[in-house]
């Protein structure tokens, strides 16, 4: 049985990784012009507690610009809560009022999913609606109507009656259809009310509508290794429905959580199951572990060439972070990064294309491919596809890869470091503009880039690459103890001490003994901050690439030699 006595306690919620992930997700979306929030409701209420956690750090202390939020969901003293809200609104300090109420309609046997005006017509208790209308005459007010709010730590799951690891379904389960609002969606609806939702309106907020039978069936499908399932349906009954139609709020950008994800997160919390990161990684079609193995094969080839030619390399970026945090690749990461200082990289770029096993691997760079214009080089595995929305647009080697990033010397003076970084970023901007034909909105100087686009599009790629290389190597012959990450994604982090990467040590990584910086702690703090060892919240544990095609060809199986006579290309050419 579910342990309800601890489900609603604040200390339990704060210790629940599933709940905290949803709170952090809502915080990441929080945009508001209000200086203070006043949340009024029953303190033991699940949704009240959640809103308080999301908004706890958002108040600026200016009480003349208050947004008041009333949480009536599940409360038995709604009248008292509304009196408190009226007191705040009448003070003149309140600039917006949001009323959160639950779906208190009785079940109907027509299968009707109720819209906002229908709710007003059908509601037996119209007191909340009437009081919201009265508040609207004083301040902009929204009334949000929620189906039953569930989520990690909600604890209101008694109807499941799961005992001894067995889920049982009866005739009554198939005849009752309920509406549910997942916690993340409920919080996002309130956030939408701050700025986007038109005032003076009622909005239904519902994530999905399912029968008790469908809920139990989904629970078994998601956790089939943990529950048995017993189904006895003998009698046809009329379905009774109690659910809301949320089409109106969807027109404002509201997007509901899918049924399976909501069930997984809610019940993992309720039953104390560990998080399965693969739930966030469906785009890999269960190939992620095999993908990682193929990347290690590339790394072994790189390691062989570097050792033979006395070239220093080291794990960097997310790969280094995984080696330090987990002793292996980050479980949800899909690529592998190595780094070199400029002197070693120039030697590597010269010898690798000649010594690499050309039957299996390809050196991908503007120096080896006419249509490749990445700022950094890649070693790719032939006869595979690792095609993203970006890379699939171009006729380039597009297989599984290992990225090779370069760290260049920069000035010891901060002003010159800033100038150097801006010159490198300008080179990157021009090169990307020439390659894609589009100005990057995410980079500073977007408008200026659009103005110079007609001129940049006429510059030959060779000239742009030469300009980029010259900017990166601007200080390489100068005596300086500082580096920048010019070819990676962390150039905006600024310069860092060269000593972080100069001395290397070795560590075990995915069955290999590989080099990493001896001062990896200082380097990772520079890249990821002081708390780099802390895992991200659950919603952030997802893949980094937007695949349009992931095809591992012959590497999809360990014994592919058996099927060598059968083409695994999947292409008719």
Image: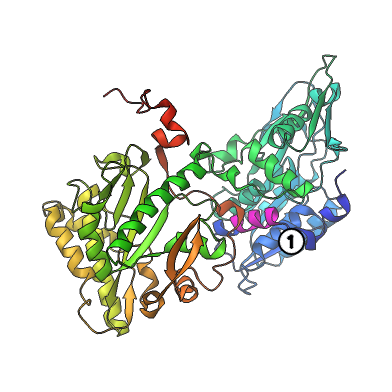
Report which quarter residue 60 is drawn in: bottom right
Is 529 colored magenta in this rendering?
Answer: no
Report which quarter residue 172 is drawn in: top right
Residue situated in front as seen by the camera: 66 or 541? 541
Indicate the quadrant containing the C terminus: top left, top right, bottom left or bottom right.
top left
Check disc 1 and report the residue beneath it: 15
Q: Position of residue 231 (x, y in %)?
A: 81, 23
Q: Position of residue 48 (x, y in %)?
A: 75, 56
Q: Residue at x 22, y 77 (%)?
A: 475
Q: Residue at x 56, y 42 (%)?
A: 255
SS category of the residue bearing label 1: helix
Is residue 121 visible from the viewing direction of this image?
Answer: no
Magenta stretch, residue numbers? 17-26
Say above or below: 83 vs 159: below
Residue situated in front as seen by the camera: 382 or 523? 382
* Label 1 environment density (alpha carbons within 10 Å; few <14, some 14–19, many ≥20): few
Left or right position of 470 against 300: left
Say above or below: 514 vs 126: below
Say above or below: 370 vs 553: below
Indicate the quadrant containing the N terminus: top left, top right, bottom left or bottom right.
top right
Report which quarter residue 490 is drawn in: bottom left
Q: Position of residue 335 (x, y in %)?
A: 43, 51
Report the magenta stretch's main SS. helix
Is 22 colored magenta in this rendering?
Answer: yes
Q: Residue at x 84, y 53 (%)?
A: 79
Left or right position of 430 against 73: left
Q: Position of residue 341 (x, y in %)?
A: 30, 70
Say above or below: 169 vs 204: above
Residue situated in front as seen by the camera: 207 or 248? 207
Is residue 356 visible from the viewing direction of this image?
Answer: yes
């Amino acid at each position: 049985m579910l342990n309800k006595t601890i489900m609603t306690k604040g200390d339990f919620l704060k210790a629940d990784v599933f709940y905290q992930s949803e709170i952090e997700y809502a915080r990441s979306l929080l945009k508001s012009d209000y200086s203070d929030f006043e949340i009024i409701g029953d303190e033991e209420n699940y949704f009240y507690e959640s809103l308080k956690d999301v908004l706890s750090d958002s108040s600026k202390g200016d009480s003349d610009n208050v947004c008041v939020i009333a949480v009536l969901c599940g409360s038995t003293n709604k009248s008292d809560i509304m009196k408190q809200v009226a007191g705040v609104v009448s003070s003149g300090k309140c600039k917006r009022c949001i009323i959160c109420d639950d779906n208190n309609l009785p079940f109907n046997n027509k299968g009707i999913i109720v819209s906002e005006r229908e709710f007003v017509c059908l509601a037996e208790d119209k007191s909340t609606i009437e009081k919201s209308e009265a508040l609207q005459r004083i301040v902009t007010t929204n009334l949000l109507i929620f189906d039953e709010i569930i989520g990690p730590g909600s604890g209101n799951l008694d109807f499941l009656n799961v005992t001894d690891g067995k889920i049982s379904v009866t005739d009554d389960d198939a005849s009752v259809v309920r509406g549910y609002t997942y916690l993340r969606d409920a919080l996002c609806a309130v956030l939408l009310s701050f700025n986007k939702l038109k005032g003076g309106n009622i909005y239904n907020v519902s994530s999905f509508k399912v029968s008790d039978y469908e809920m139990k069936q989904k629970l078994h499908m998601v956790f089939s290794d943990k529950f048995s399932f017993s189904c006895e349906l003998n009698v046809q009954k009329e379905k009774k429905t109690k659910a809301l139609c949320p089409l109106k709020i969807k027109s404002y950008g509201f997007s509901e959580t899918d049924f399976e994800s909501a069930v997984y997160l809610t019940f993992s919390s309720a039953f104390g199951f560990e998080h399965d990161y693969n739930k966030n990684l469906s785009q890999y079609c269960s190939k992620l572990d095999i993908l990682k193995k193929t990347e290690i094969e590339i790394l072994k080839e790189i390691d062989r060439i570097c050792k033979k030619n006395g070239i220093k390399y080291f794990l960097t970026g997310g790969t280094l972070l995984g080696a330090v945090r987990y002793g292996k690749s980050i479980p949800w990461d899909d690529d592998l990064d190595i780094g070199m200082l400029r002197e070693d990289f120039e030697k590597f770029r010269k010898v690798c294309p000649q010594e690499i096993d050309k039957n299996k691997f390809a050196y991908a760079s503007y120096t080896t491919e006419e249509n490749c214009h990445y700022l950094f080089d890649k070693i790719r595995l032939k006869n595979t596809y690792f095609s993203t929305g970006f890379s699939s647009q171009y006729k380039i080697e597009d297989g599984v890869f290992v990225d090779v990033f370069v760290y260049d010397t920069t000035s010891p003076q901060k002003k010159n470091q800033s100038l150097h970084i801006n010159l490198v970023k300008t080179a990157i901007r021009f090169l990307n503009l020439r390659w894609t034909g589009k100005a990057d909105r995410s980079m500073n100087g977007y408008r200026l880039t659009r103005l110079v686009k007609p001129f940049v599009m006429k510059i030959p790629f060779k000239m742009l690459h030469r300009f980029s290389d010259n900017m990166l190597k601007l200080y390489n012959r100068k005596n300086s103890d500082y580096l920048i990450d010019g070819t990676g994604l962390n150039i905006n982090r600024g310069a860092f001490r060269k000593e972080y990467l100069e001395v290397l040590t070795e560590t075990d990584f995915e069955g290999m003994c590989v080099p990493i910086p001896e001062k990896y702690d200082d380097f990772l703090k520079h890249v990821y901050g002081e708390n780099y060892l802390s895992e991200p919240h659950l919603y952030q544990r997802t893949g980094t690439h937007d695949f349009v095609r992931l095809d591992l060809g012959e590497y999809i199986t360990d014994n592919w030699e058996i099927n060598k006579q059968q083409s695994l290309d999947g292409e008719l050419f």
